[in-house]
Amino acid sequence: MALIDIKDLHVSVQGKDILKGISLSIEAGEVHAIMGPNGTGKSTLSNIIAGRDGYDIKSGSVTYDGQDLLAMEPDVRARAGVFLAFQYPVEIPGVSTSAFLKSAINTKRRAEGKPEIDAMEFLKLVKAKNKALGIPDDMIKRPLNVGFSGGEKKRAEVLQMTLLEPRFAVLDETDSGLDIDALKVVSDGVNALRGATRAFLVITHYQRLLNYIVPDHVHVMAGGRIVKSGGKDLAHELEAEGYAKYLAAA
Amino acid sequence: MVATGLLDHPFKEGYAARLGALPGAAHAWIDGLRQTARGILNASGLPGPKNEAWKFTPLGELSKIPFIPAATADDIDVREVPRGVPSIPGAQRVVLVNGVVNTALSDPLDALPGLRIESFKQLLVREPQTLKPFLGGIASSGALPLAALNAAYMADGLVIMTAKNFAGATLHIVSIGAAGAEPLAFHPRNIIALETGARLTVVETHIGLPGQSYLANPVTEISLADNASLRRYVSVAEDADAFHFATTSVALAAHSSFETFHLGLGGAKVRQEVRAALNGAGADCCMNGVYALTAKQHHDLTTVVEHHVPHGTSSQLVKGVVDGQSHGVFQGRIHVARDAQKTDARQLHKALFLSKGPEVDCKPELEIFADDVQCAHGAATGELDREHLFYLMARGLDRDTARALLVAGFLDEAVATISDENVRAVFSDMVNGWLKRRGV
Ligand SMILES: Nc1ncnc2c1ncn2[C@@H]1O[C@H](COP(=O)(O)OP(=O)(O)OP(=O)(O)O)[C@@H](O)[C@H]1O
Ligand SMILES: [Mg+2]
């Protein structure tokens, strides 16, 4: 059984059809990539998976680990192991990054019936992850995402992912805004999590990321549909030829 | 001293007469202050909705409560400091019960050289001339109806004075309101005078014991000489049926600085009015605050900053959360006189609605007569940001935890400005305690 199974998903926003029948099935252990032109519905799909409201889900289903994902509240999804690294993480003034991280980790631990993390253990853990991701320790003392540079925001998203160890993670353009070194570091972070029990959906505009996070499947999304699926070579082809022929098809 | 029926307005019949001879009545100028105040009260009564400065917090209902003077309630015996009073590390504690200094509950008042802490009552009797430069001169009865009410009946309070260049200490003033069988009122008068270059931190905890209603009407007159620096942190968490109207007036000489924070966590009706006059060049005044209201609570934070001379700076950041059927008021007036060039004055008020029931009134007023100034003010009210809530929930936090974190974060932006670390931690705990009790 696939870890996540999206079937014929139709979604509109404010009367406008955005997703026009998406079907996508991802097995545990797999990495899938989605590429596609701007405004085609990639973030919409990510947000639907994470449980953001404001969308009109007309038909279709999303099943995660055998459960009806769309019926779950966003926090329930997260505790069940679903994670979205946002394309545009929001800035939350007044909420310290470290207090938030600790709260998120402990929420997950409680859900798993584990004891809460103590302050020392938490600091040690975050320091180690920060080091791996090239995040200065001072950053987590600041309010959540506030004034973080574009690249810092993306690193912070990946930090959260590595701390929460989700079973299914969607990375929505996590590579945009990252410098070349960061791209490598962040990819290493993702690759370290890869394993037989986890699955990833990586949304990107650039084939370069897929050199580091090598996908099992690549999908082209255009006009609210998946118009082509293939192996990792499809990304190279897209990089060379662009989307023109798929746009015509959509 | 005259005490006719009208003079008793608005309280229980015979209010003034019950007080008997007030301390210091033998001194003509003190008696004069009281007479003038009573004259003002008789002429205009307590402020109602037609009084522009009080239109959001009219006091008509007070006249329906038969308050007696606290001094005449002989059925009250407060033997310990209530549990809700925080302990401030390193602070010397002074306790007032119903506006009267309680030596049994206080630390010794004469412990520090260069710092004088006295009961207002004792100074009124013993050496009133010490008070003359300040009393009634900083908070004038003419302009402030509640200061007039205070002046008419003032009997005790605290006088805090420092020597020149006093290097600093932290005082914790605990004011306990406790009524016996009858509602009572008290009108403490406090004076804080810092000599040139002196530094002082004053923390005030206003708290009440459950029971009959009471009215706390403190007036605090503060004088800061050149280069003096005062930090004053006030929290008000009165009993649910209590009234608290506090007037603070501060006179700032050149290069003095005044940092204040007002935390309003309750009482039936509360107004904290803070007025700062920047009389000397280069003075700095920072007046921040937080209010958190629920049920039918009413809280009014009113500030007035007067820039009279050049190169003054003032900043205000006030944040409120409102729930239930509560009513929050923020009024902030910034006055920049013609001579006060190069003034930098800022003000920001933000209120967060936790439900649809509450009401918030915000009245910023800028009166700027100088041309070379920087002035900015802003106000915003709204609900919790849905995007913020979603982000936190997408990381697994349940809705209540996410909300609590966001509300705490919203308020913390103001609390974080408290420059005294110990006090910041204590105030932060008080705010978080409120949020926990509310289950926000
Ligand atoms: N709240 C909204 N109201 C109206 N239109 C919306 C709303 N949210 C998304 N859309 C529209 O839906 C379409 C898909 O947006 P989406 O963000 O999913 O695109 P995307 O594929 O992620 O694009 P990009 O590559 O630029 O990130 C766009 O045309 C966008 O303008
Ligand atoms: Mg997008």
Image (cartoon, rainbow, N blue to C red):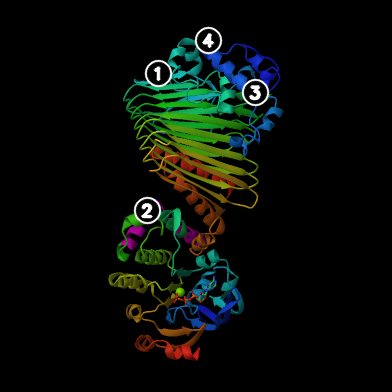
Instruction: Give the chain of mark 2.
Output: A
Q: Nearer the viewer, residue A168 or B326?
A: B326
**Spot occupied by residue B404 in the image (x, y as percentages of width and height):** 53, 52
Question: Mark 3: few, some, or many residues within 10 Å (few <14, many ≥20)?
Answer: few
Instruction: Give the chain of mark 1.
Output: B
Taking the magenta stretch, the answer to whether it contains residue B170 is no
3 or 4: mark nearer the eye: 3
- Mark 3: secondary structure: helix
Instruction: Give the residue pinned by disc 2.
Output: A141
Q: Nearer the viewer, residue B7 or B340?
A: B340
Q: Relative to A52, is A4 above or below?
A: below
Instruction: Give the residue pinned by disc 4.
Output: B28
**Spot occupied by residue A87 in the image (x, y as percentages of width and height):** 43, 70
Instruction: Give the residue pinned by disc 3.
Output: B43
The span from disc 4 to disc 1 (Cα, nearest Å) is 29 Å
Instruction: Give the residue pinned by disc 1.
Output: B110
Region of the chain picked out in magenta, as a range: A105-130
Tell me the kind of residue under disc 4. Ala
Taking the magenta stretch, the answer to whether it contains residue A127 is yes
The span from disc 3 to disc 1 (Cα, nearest Å) is 42 Å
